[in-house]
Amino acid sequence: MPVSLPSSSLIYSALKECDVRLLSALPETWLVHLIRLAEQDPEMTLVRLAKEEEGVGISAGAHFAGVKSAMLMQNHGFLAAINGIVSFAHLYKIPLLMLISYRGSFGERDPWQTQGGNVTEPLLRALGIPYCFLDAAETVKKRIRHAQTLAESSLQPVAVLLTRDLMWEE
Amino acid sequence: MLRVDCLRSIYPELERSLVITIMGAVATELQSLGHRANFFYLQHAMGLASSTGLGLALCKPEQRVVVLDGDGSLLMNLGSLSTMARYRPRNLVHVVFDNESLLSVGGFPTATGTGTDLEGIARAAGVPRVATVRDLENFKAAVRGAEQANELSTIIAKVEATGPSAYVTGLTLLENRFQFQRHIQSLRKA
C-alpha cells in the first residue's frame, strides 16, 4: 500500500509536539499509518469511533477536561460530522483540530470518492471553517502547529486537508 | 414516573459529578431544580451528550461523569453505545430518560414506543451494567448502584411523556459552557 509512512510519521510527531494527547479516528486508507502510530503510543488516547460526528463530542469533553485532541477522518467523515460541528462546536465555541484526508480530488482512481472531493472545500467555506493543505513534508509541522494555535485562540473548528501529494507514494 | 422527580431524587448526589444533559425537557427541568457550575446542558447536537461524557470520562478518570440522555437523542447516535462499551470508563454513568417520544417537538413517538429496547441494545453493544427502571425507588437505587459498582452503566428510566411548557431559560449557552469548563479547571487545582 503506497500510503506514505514518512509523511504519516511527520504528521504524527507534529501532533505530539502540539501536545495532542487524544485522537479520535475512523480508519480510511490514507490514515492507516497514523492510526497505527497512535495505537502504539502509550501517551496517546486513541478513541475509535463508529461515526465521525461522535468525535465532536469526544473532543469537546477532552477540551473541557483540559486535554488537547485532534480528529482523524476522511472528507466523507467530515460530511457525516457536520451537524455536530455546527450545533456543538460552532454553537458552543469548541476548538476542533480536524485532520481530513482529501479524497476524490485530482488523481483519484476510486469512483466512489469523487463526489465528496467536489464538495469538500465549498462546504468548508460555507461553514466558515478556516482550512489549509498539507502537501509538502517541509511545511507539515508548521501548518499543524498554526492550525492548532488558531483553533485554540479562536475556539472554533479548523481543518487541515491531507492531500495526495503528501499521503500517497507512486 | 416523572423525569423531574427522578432528577430531584438524585439531585444531591449530582453535586459530586460532572453532569452533561441533552436539550429540551431534561435541561430545563434540571435547571428548575437549581443550576450548578458542574452541569452542562448540550442544547443541540442531538446524540452527542453521551460522546461528550465519554470524552470527559476518559480524560478525567478520577471524576464521576453522569450523562442525562433521552431516547430520541440516543436513537440518533446508537453507535455511541458501542464506542462507550469499547472503552467502558468506570467513572461514567449513562442515564437515558425514555418517554417514547420526541416531546419537545410535538410528542411524536420514537421507536422505543413501538418496541425498540434500548436496554437490550446497550447490553448487546457491550455495556457491562444495564438496567431498566420504572419507579423512583428503583431509579435512585440504580443510579446509586452504578456509582458504587464503579463500572460503566446505562440505566433506562421509563418516564411519562410530559415536561415543562417552555424550554428557553435565563442561562445563556456560552455562559454555561465557560462556567462548566472553569469549574473543571478549579477541580484540577484543588
Image (cartoon, rainbow, N blue to C red):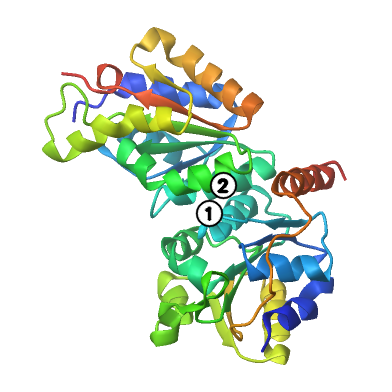
What secondary structure is found at the residue carrying circle 2?
A: helix
For residue B104, which quarter of the picture? bottom right
Q: In screen coordinates, is B69 left or right of A54?
A: right
Please give the chain letter of the residue carrying mark 1.
Answer: B
Q: Is residue B8 visible?
A: yes
- Quadrant in which the N terminus of chain B appears: bottom right
Query: What's the amino acid at mark 2?
Result: Phe
Image point 81% across, 63% down: which residue?
B16
Asked if the residue under mark 2 is in contact with the one under mark 1, i.e. CB atoms within 8 Å, the reply is yes
Residue A112 % position (x, y): 16, 41
- Exactly how many numbered labels are in the figure? 2
Q: In screen coordinates, is B130 left or right of A135?
A: right
Q: In screen coordinates, is B106 left or right of B10?
A: left
Image point 59% across, 68% down: which residue?
B69
Measure how far apart labels 1 and 2 are at the Cα level: 6 Å
Image point 38% across, 18% down: which residue?
A133
What secondary structure is found at the residue carrying circle 1?
A: loop
Q: In screen coordinates, is B123 left or right of B96?
A: left
For residue A76, which quarter of the picture? top left
**Which class describes the residues within 10 Å of circle 2: few (<14), some (14-19), or many (20+)?**
many
Compared to B51, does A117 lie above or below?
A: above
Label number found at residue A72: none
Residue B120 % position (x, y): 43, 81
Which residue in the structure is indicated by mark 2? A88
Residue A160 % position (x, y): 43, 25
- Quadrant in which the C terminus of chain B appears: top right
Residue A151 % position (x, y): 58, 27
The extreme right residue here reads: B190
Compared to A151, does B99 lie above or below?
A: below
Which residue in the structure is indicated by mark 1? B45
